[in-house]
Image (tube, rainbow, N blue to C red):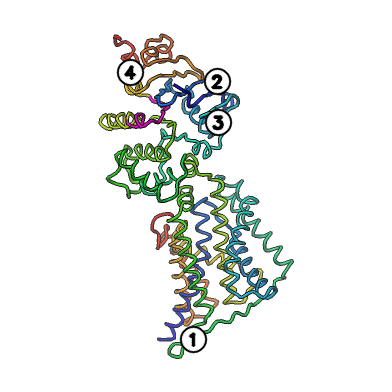
Amino acid sequence: MSALLEVNNISKRFGGLQAVDRLSLTVNEGEILGLIGPNGAGKSTVFNLINGVYPPDGGSIVFVGQDITGGPPYRVARQGIARAHQIVQPLGGLSVLDNCTVGACFGRQGLGLVPAREVAREVVDMIGLGDRPDMLAASLTTAGKKRLELARALSARPRLLLLDEVLAGLNPTETEGMIETVHKIRDSGVAILMIEHIMRAVMSLSDRIVVLNLGSKLAEGSPQQVADNPEVITAYLGDSKLLSVAEKPA
Amino acid sequence: MIGILASVIDGILIGAVYGLAAMGLTLIWGVMNVINLAHGAIVVVGMFVLYMLVSALGLPAYGAVPVMIVLGFVIGIGLYWIGVHRMIGRPELMSLLSTFALNMVLIGLGTAWWTTSPYNVQVNMPSVSWRGYTFTGTHITAAALAVVIAGLLYLLLYHTRIGKAVRAVATNREAAELCGIPTTQVLAMAFGLGVALAGVSGTLIATMFPFTVLSGEAYQLKSFVVTVLGGLGNPAGALMGGIALGLIEGLATPFMPVSWIPIVEFGLFVFCLIAFPRGIFSFTKA
């Protein structure tokens, strides 16, 4: 397996807070890498650094052999890294289809309007919004907006998808549907780096997991290795969801 | 009765040009939440571009229209980098003050160059007569051009890739950037477009009426009334609002002294702000 994204020793400090501390990680072609850690561990900051929303204080980020450290975000997006946000960011005044058309127009392939609309329609169908392409993004339900985030990101035809808690706020049925969708995306050849708090989901979806605590890497390995790691359990102590997974006999 | 009708029709023709000016103001607000107080000065730039091209270079009057669109776009992008870019995302007072400063600089330069005496550009267009009433050719042409330019703006915003980028940035700049849109360039371009619209409306106004370096203020105030009628941030509403304002002016003129017209207009402005804060012609935010 070859490395798609290489994050080398990145750090970021906000005032007195060392949000990310000399973190390195690798995402391989076609894999799902889970990024977990307690609240405030710096997971979203890692995404913002990869995206180029802010430049790291040190370290480098290499994507498909290209140095993308420090953005700007639109250029990183065009290189083929798309992102779905924890707090949904729809283009509220545009229709569902137009949201995805924008994604396709300015994504990795930089399509013209007509082919972009084709791609958008295809993705909207695949992601399960095919029944309401003309609805304004602002008037979708929360689950709908989460799907739209995903659809818009995929319309860019990315090689790497950053998923920031796409399951948060969904009911169990919606969660099931979303997990299925994430599987479908990986099967289409897109690598995924996902932040997720729902342990059952992240354990079952991820090929490998990186555990973050206080901005640096606490553990790395297969879901089972990570769940068996006593340091991880300590960091999460009190989180019964992880404990229940960890205590399950192998 | 027919006299009123003629006055109303002329009002609508002029109103279309007011609408075009207001589209420039409302586009900039809609995309970057900046109220461009240099709007009036830019209308004046458009007027003097007509004067220079026709009187000094001998160009045909309507040849100044495409020149002004291009020039306005370039000037707009320049003004964006000088006085607007650093104010994006800051409190609105900052951009109000900086665009007001740009306004004063432009008016100051204009006064030094052309003084404040009135100028007039003679444009010969055949008039249209109908039942003994004459409709001035320049008014008809200006209104037609205003509608065509508004239509082109609509096509640009709703049926091109660039338009999609502009609308994406208008609704959510952060998300647009993460979709791969160079949002800073899009903001500069939208400001350029807004300035081009204001400038070209000035050019069209100058084909109809005499003007001075200080004429901009009156048209800027009219643009505010129009955008409030049409819903701030809504270009289609701006054209409707402009036509409505022209209609009101046309309707009121036969019945009252001209000095009363601003009182009617701004009475309406206040009424609209209270009764229809989102505009009478407000559809969705573009």
Mark 3 and mark 2: Cα distance apart in space: 23 Å
Q: Give the mark, 3 or 2, whose residue is nearer the N terminus.
A: 2
Q: How crowded is mark 1: few (under 14 residues within 10 Å), some or many (20 or more)?
A: few
**Residue type indicated by callout 3:** Gln
Q: Is residue B76 above or below residue B9?
A: above
Asked if labels 4 and 1 touch by Cβ distance under 8 angstroms, the answer is no
Asked if labels 4 and 2 touch by Cβ distance under 8 angstroms, the answer is no
**Residue type indicated by callout 1:** Thr
Picture coordinates of residue B96 (x, y %)?
A: 59, 53
| Residue sitting farthest toward the front | A1
Viewer-proximal residue, A203 or A231?
A203
Mark 4 and mark 3: Cα distance apart in space: 39 Å
Instruction: Name the residue rendered at 60%, 64% in the picture.
Output: B40
Q: Is mark 3 on a helix, strand or loop?
A: strand
**Residue type indicated by callout 2:** Asp
Q: Do labels 1 and 4 share a chain?
A: no
| Magenta stretch encompasses residue B249 | no
| Residue range corresponding to the magenta coloring | A184-196
- Residue on which disc 2 sits: A21
- Residue on which disc 4 sits: A241
Q: Residue A66, which numbered label?
A: 3
Horizontal side, residue A41 vs residue B64: left or right: left
Q: Residue B134, which numbered label?
A: 1
